[in-house]
Image (spheres, rainbow, N blue to C red):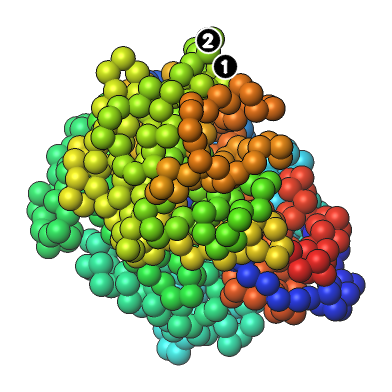
Amino acid sequence: MATRALLSWSITAVAAASSSADGPGLIEPIVSADVSSLNRAHDGGITFTTFRGPVSLADALADAGYNTVRLRLWVDPIEPYTGLADVLDVAAECHDAGLDIWLNFHYSDTWADPGQQTKPAAWADLGFPALNEQLYNYTRAVLETFEASSIPLTHVQLGNEIQNGMLWPDGQIFGGGSPQWAPFIELVASARQAVDDAEIAQTPLVIVHPGGDSLGFFFDEIESRGVDYDIAGLSYYSWFHGQLDVLESGLGAMAGATAKPVMVAETAYPWTLGFGDSRGNRIGPSNWPDDLISSYFPSPNGQAEYLEAVWDRVHAVGDDRGLGVSYWEPAQVPGIVEDSSRENLALFDFNAVAQPGLERYAAAATPIDGRHVGQDAAYAQPVAEQARVPASPLVDQLDALFLTQRSGGLHIGITGNLEDRGGALVVLLDLDPQGTQGQQVLDLPAGLPAGIPILDDMVLDPGFKPDLALAFNTWNGTMFVDRIDLGPSTQTTFLGSVVVGAGESALINGTNPHGIVVAHDNGNTAGIGSSCGAPASATTGLEVFIPRGALASPLDQHAGIGVLTLILKREGVMTDQWLPPLPSNVTAPFAVSSAIDLTTFPGTQHTVFDLSPANRRAQAVADADVNDDGVRTADDVVTFLEYFNAGRPVTDVTGDGQLDVFDVAAFSSLLAGGC
């Protein structure tokens, strides 16, 4: 049976162990695209191209930072696409690329949407009881087929754009006389029961997606009638629904009608008003500007800015309940279907070359803000964690270091705290540690910020030769950022400044042609310096995004990146806060009177991070504040059990990829231990 059956005994036992502590939980955002036409692309011989060159579509999405694909399923389609065999094939390819699978049941042989919900031909003559039973059996059989194929489903959508019901006329809500909710509710309940009863290892999250426009009434109705689901979704297309304020109000209406997370389940926007085949497009010159958004002209950059604006609306949903966005058919380029009317809505151009929106869409999902560091979808497990309690617990501490390559560049996340009196946090990056041989000495240019010159002539560990250093100084509530290019010709560039704790990332008043962004939040009070001594509990600090163009050596040419980060005081004093952590026998803080020789320290004072796609996914959190309210109480137990039963990866406390009774035991230990 699915995991929800394991926990009927556990709520009292786990609740008894609850206590309070700081530290948020994790719900990974859904960064998704509908790639239901993937096999059409294969059959059409289409090759997709990103900055890496020719790549598979699944790898292109994973590389850009997407974590989920949405796949529609028709019962008996006329063409050999979108049926169960085709969807299983596409899902397997995407799963192998590290993407989660969101299965979208249409419960039809063709398109299902607010204007049509045609029953499958094989179900057309069934009376309502038999139809209801068939729906249950079909849904359960599909889930068990995925299980037998070793393809886990993380999300399941029960019907597509069902604001007017599904399986018409039996489940039609509107269409004559007063609304008929009862048959529709019974059908949805049967489909949900099939999800719960399926013999699968992990129950997927259930998405209800009525469509677009004002949907508060729909969720009011299904909530009052006891429909069990996990995520509420809507569609948003400006030519159907209106300007962005309609999206904002629609998300707000959903959030007001349900306590569930909400998301945009479908959206798209043109990158041109032209067309790439013999057929004109659904959205063309006659649609500008009335059916589009005047702030975003249909161009590659306008499309990317539109997608960032959609994510802004999702992030703005109260109580952090804006969960995600799914782009509809980003790869429907010319040739994927004969004479398409939608190729100008893709995230690739007419030659299947990636547009800016492909990466900027994923980047917008996890904004650089200095908060939730290490928990955003951008990051996987820490590259390094602190082992030394700092002399001053609330300042000058580095708790954990996170790195990943996605969304067109390098993400750096550092949890911790930095004194607001000119202390310097320095990050040294070796873009090609595999190519480094022999002993290296750090040669810094003149004119560096206070404290940093003491690193000049530092003897580095073998195999570590930094190409680039970033220095971050905070003073009177502002962080000042310098870039130090190392190598044959060293130079320092002041990139700009940013206000600490503002959640903003744009550097101002400097020279920053490549658009490096930085955010810093000094709100951490529960890291290695706390009574718990648990670096994984720290969630605020420094976040940096370095666009690919700002790096002298393309990251994709190498398997890894070497990194060392440390904190210096303004007076030129070395603290004990390094990542990787300093060996225990090194006494710090200390004033530096001569060049530091790292080879005299035990071990290696840098780490090499593997840039492979497998290291680009967030994992389970290591604390027990599952509901993210800042304290750990019995409410977290309830939330934990709900999430565990729903198969949410946040509750994989042991981090072994399975949801089982060992996670319950580990969660109970977290509560009881106070850390």
Work out whether residue 452 or residue 668 is closer to the camera in this orientation and state it: 452
Quarter in which the N terminus is drawn? bottom right
Work out whether residue 234 or residue 483 is closer to the camera in this orientation and state it: 483
Residue denoted by label 1: 462
Q: Position of residue 36 (x, y in %)?
A: 47, 42
Q: Position of residue 662 (x, y in %)?
A: 85, 55
For the point 65% across and 63% down, which residue is it? 530
Q: What number is the disc on residue 605?
A: none
- Kindly check if marks 2 and 1 are in contact, taking CB atoms under 8 A apart as contact: yes
Q: In the visual, does 242 lie left or right of 215?
A: left
Q: What number is the disc on residue 437?
A: 2
Work out whether residue 463 or residue 634 is closer to the camera in this orientation and state it: 463
Q: In the visual, does 551 lie left or right of 23?
A: left
For the point 49% across and 36% down, which residue is it? 592
Name the amino acid, label 2.
Gln
Q: Is residue 540 above or below residue 407?
A: below
Q: Is residue 214 above or below residue 93?
A: below
In this view of the protein, can residue 505 be seen by the observer? no
